[in-house]
Image (cartoon, helix red, strand yellow):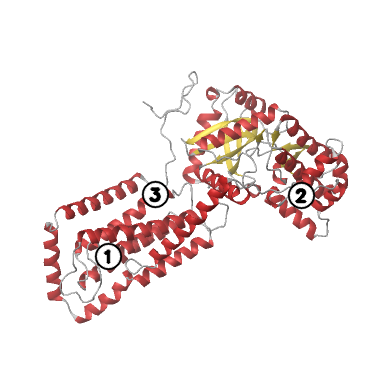
Amino acid sequence: MSTGRLPSADRKPRRPSGDPTAIRPDMRLSTYAWALVVVGVVGAVFFVIVGNPDPWWFEADEELAEWIGSVRTSWAADVADAVEWLGSPWSLRIGLWGGVAVLLAYRRWRQLFTLATVVVAVEWLTERASEAIARSRPEGALEAIDGYSHPSIALAGLGVVLVGLGYALIPRGRFRHMWFVSSAITMVAAGLARLYLSVSHLSDLLLGAFGGAAIAVGAFALLVPEESFPIDYHRRRSAHLPVTGKRGLVLREALEQQLLATNGMESVTMRHALTTQLGCDVVHCQLVDLKPFGQAGSAGSTPLRISVRGQIEGDVFAKLYSMNHLRSDRWYKLGRAILYGRLEDERPFTSVRRLVEYEDYMLRVMRDAGLPSPVPHGVVQLVPGREYLIVTEFFEGSVEIDQAEVGPEIVDEGLDIVRRLWDAGLAHRDLKPANLLVQRGSVKLIDVAFGEVRPTPWRKSVDLANMMLILALHVGSELVYERALTRFTEQEIAEAFAATRGLTIPAQLKSHLKAHQASGGLDLIEAFRKLAPERSPISIQRWGLRRLGLSAAVVIGGIVMIVATYQNLRGVDLL
């Protein structure tokens, strides 16, 4: 049983320490408990009513409706009729479609999908439940409303829309709390108005309101945990998770326990690397600072710079991976398979752990092949199966290649990197300026997460073309071509630029090429093609049964989902 204390110096800690993880899904345990209790109570009530069509509270509902009818006044009924508009189809449509517009504008697809799904699910469930119970509306209702009374579809719709919009649009904190308080007041007001007008019974309103709200809470807690999908209106990349607050504290604690503690260094490579750089095998390393770093060139992880003090003070580099990045990788590879077919063996990772393990493996493979890539220091576990941190050497004093002075020596080093990749049977697959650093006149290769062992000839050619384009941005195509001929044949260079298409050029490099041409420079791709022997373009389209099947499934599924969602969101019962 864990005591929560750090391990003693003469005893190695368990890996991981055995303590419960400090980061949990974004909802508190009380939120899950509340949603489960409400859903359980709603479900129990439904089955009781189905088994006994006339439970005891139905009689109490009727007595309350009779009493309200006896004291009702015309002016109060007019006020109630105006307030009841809060739960009308048009008010819900305005709120829902307004929220959908904001989610579309900020491209929050997961929140949008969850909101649409939960609204449709609540509509379907309440309609089926009301038909199964078949309870008629109170006698003396002042409004003629079609359909059955129990549960209240209007209050269920109001509850799911208000709660769903709160979780989808408002960051966690004071403003979300104020929204939920206002939502509760709105639901109470709408419920009292419907009760006063005798269009619903009290139990109809309670069951509908609590059921709709609870389903929304549960759906967003499970499908869109805010730790992984934070709400932010600063237009940052979704790959860049915040490392402040709760996650920042857990990052620091995990680094101290799993990586920086001297007696926790089970990896010989890790111990040697940190000993060489910081003297961490002699004294316990201390974490000094942790902050985002180099996010402009990163779209698949959250890059961090970590300051550590051992015998000397220095920095290490880290990348944070979560379920958000795993899902992005899956969608990215699915999209490539549909658009281009099977260019190479690209399979999605099965878990965040596998993704991090693969990058750690590729770092070691690159180092063993003599490539100037960073030394891996190890993997830190934050949430088992969900969040991991991979830590590597930090190239102190380095700058991206587009900020360095590039001469013939740098050109030679860049081309040597590609030659070594080819000779070792490797491919980087993401050569762009942000992944080539210059440190004291030497080129360093980083971000090998997309690396590939035994790549296809097409992929090897793409790496060569991208490296030559990066270097030519600084010294021109002729010098780069001349230096490349000392390492590659004319036919290999011609093949590289025959394979060059929009897909093969990373987005950052593509923007640099456009800016170069806009400032009066040459079209570097065409310049290299003129220098190399003529070669017909290499098609990047690959057709097969898998691509046809995926494309058909996505098109059919998308059409069905759009039609079904549109019909449900504009239906007369709920919205």
How far apart marks 1 and 2 lie (CA) works out to 67 Å
Task: Report which residue position mark 1 lands on.
Answer: 188
Marked residue nearer the N-terminal end (1 or 3): 1
Position of 535 compared to 377: left or right?
right
Give the camera-side residue of 452 and 99.
452
For mark 3, what is the residue? 221
Q: Mark 1–mark 2 contact, CB under 8 Å?
A: no
Residue 403 visible to an observer of this rendering: no
Image vertical order of residue 74 relative to residue 181, above or below: below
Q: Secondary structure at mark 2?
A: loop
Asked whether residue 39 appears in the rendered view, the answer is yes
Which residue matches tag 2? 537
Within 10 angstroms of label 2, few (less than 14), some, or many (20 or more) residues? some
* Mark 1 or 2, closer to the camera: 2
Q: Which mark is residue 486?
A: none
> Can you say which quadrant of the picture contains the N terminus?
top left
> Considering only order in the chain, which callout, 3 or 2, is on the residue closer to the N terminus?
3
Q: Position of residue 135 (x, y in %)?
A: 18, 64
Which one is closest to the eye, mark 2 or mark 3? 2
